[in-house]
Amino acid sequence: MLIESPPAGSRPDPAWSGPPPVLLASHIRATAPMVSVAGGRGPGGAPVTAFRIDAQPVTAAEFARFTGQTGHVTAAERAGWSYEVAGHAPRAVAGLTWRTPYRPGTAADPLAAVVHVAWSDAVAYAAWAGKRLPSEAQWVRAAAGRGDGAEGCGSRRTPGDHWEWTADVHDPGRGTRTVRAGGARAGLVPDLTAGNVGFRCVSAP
């Protein structure tokens, strides 16, 4: 389930007061492996030039290296809460962040996709890594499995399983950004964070 914007009057469950869990440095690698995607046509026949895309979504370990070097504080960490969405209607839970994505006080799996990150957090990571967020056309082309190695890029997802931020504006009037999951698309307000929203990056070939 995806939340397009926070419900009015959302209030998180009681906050976690323990120390923040620490990810093991031994799990941290410099950058995610990338695969090449040949140029061609994207949605609606729009031309897409060749590019490289992360083979998998950015992991918690990779995001930990970014925050460790930059001191970046995510939107969820500043707010003190994020949305939990697994197995029930979305609810705001205090203490959920990318460091504690499953429940407050429990550390993230370093090799799992980083979640509870806002669009601005994803953009900041991409800039630090010398990359950028994919356009929706790039994301769709990679997911279609066309081009060298694109079938293994990991963009194929069951709708509702794991959504990923893109660079594109979804609704200019509402200021939402496009997210993708499998063949599904939606728009999210850029400061929204949830346990099923992450991202991957692209770069020039």
Image: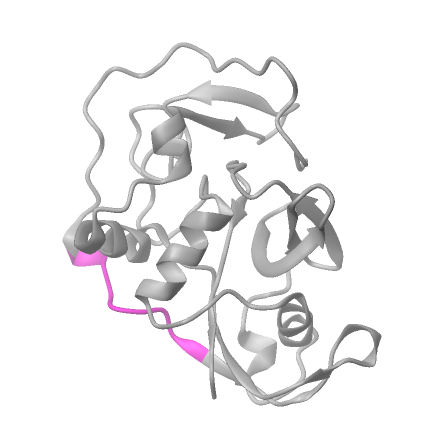
Snapshot quadrant of residue 79: top left
The image shows residue 40 at horizontal and vertical percentages of 71, 88
The image shows residue 49 at horizontal and vertical percentages of 62, 87
Please give left or right for residue 200 compared with residue 71 in the image: right
Please name the residue shown 65% across and 17% down the image: 8
Residue farthest to the right, as pictured = 44
Snapshot quadrant of residue 37: bottom right
Q: Is residue 10 magenta?
A: no
Q: Is residue 113 visible?
A: no
| Secondary structure mostly seen in the magenta stretch | loop
Q: Is residue 20 visible?
A: yes
Residue farthest to the front, as pictured = 173
Q: How many marks?
A: 0
The image shows residue 5 at horizontal and vertical percentages of 65, 32
198 or 177, which is in the foreground? Answer: 177
Please name the residue shown 48% across and 15% down the image: 12
Please name the residue shown 68% across and 72% down the image: 137
Q: State the quadrant of the N terminus.
A: top right
Point out the stretch of residues depicted in magenta.
26-34
The image shows residue 126 at horizontal and vertical percentages of 40, 63
- The image shows residue 174, relative to residue 70, as above or below, that is above
Please give left or right for residue 107 compared with residue 176 in the image: left
Snapshot quadrant of residue 134: bottom right
Please name the residue shown 71% across and 53% down the image: 170
How is the protein colored in the picture? one colour
